[in-house]
Image (cartoon, rainbow, N blue to C red):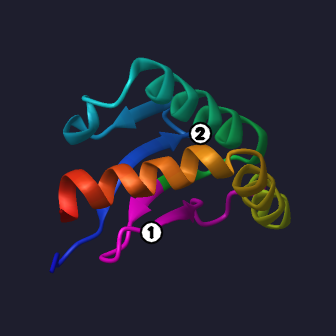
Amino acid sequence: MFEEKIVLCVSNSYEKKYYLNDDFQSLPQQVKDELKIMCVLYTEEVGGILSLEYEEDGSLQFMVQAKEGDLLFDEIGSALKIKQIREEKKELLEALETYYKVFFLQ
């Protein structure tokens, strides 16, 4: 269906920036705030760049990047933190997947 994955949001620890895709501005403010807090806390704790991207089937994936030679990036901590987020924010993540399937995939 789509050639590229759809990015929901990105948090970048190198530039200290957060981005929410304009296509998702219709999300409730509380959801947008929770996404921002979740992603920024991740990058502050682990480092690197975290992006939440939708697959073609509507599933939400955590994509992590780190600059080559970044000695402060914690790869093991990254995997553990993502596992923790998936458990603690399960309802939010499932709701975001449902939202995407309803409003974007129809």
Query: Which one is earlier in the sequence, the residue at label 2 or at label 1?
Result: 2
Nearest the viewer among 2 and 17 is 2
Q: Which residue is the site of mark 2?
A: 39
Q: Which residue is the site of mark 1?
A: 59
Q: Is residue 35 left or right of residue 101?
A: right
Tell me the SS state at disc 1: loop
Tell me the SS state at disc 2: helix
Quadrant location, the C terminus: bottom left
Q: Is residue 5 left or right of residue 72?
A: left
Q: Judge the density around disc 2: few (<14), some (14-19), many (≥20) Cα neighbours within 10 Å.
A: many
Q: Is residue 55 magenta?
A: yes
Q: Judge the density around disc 1: few (<14), some (14-19), many (≥20) Cα neighbours within 10 Å.
A: some
| Residue 60: image location, x then y, percent | 47, 63
Above or below, 56 against 26 in this view is below
Q: Is residue 24 magenta?
A: no
What residue is drawn where x is 21% and y is 35%?
22
Which stretch is magenta?
A: 52-71
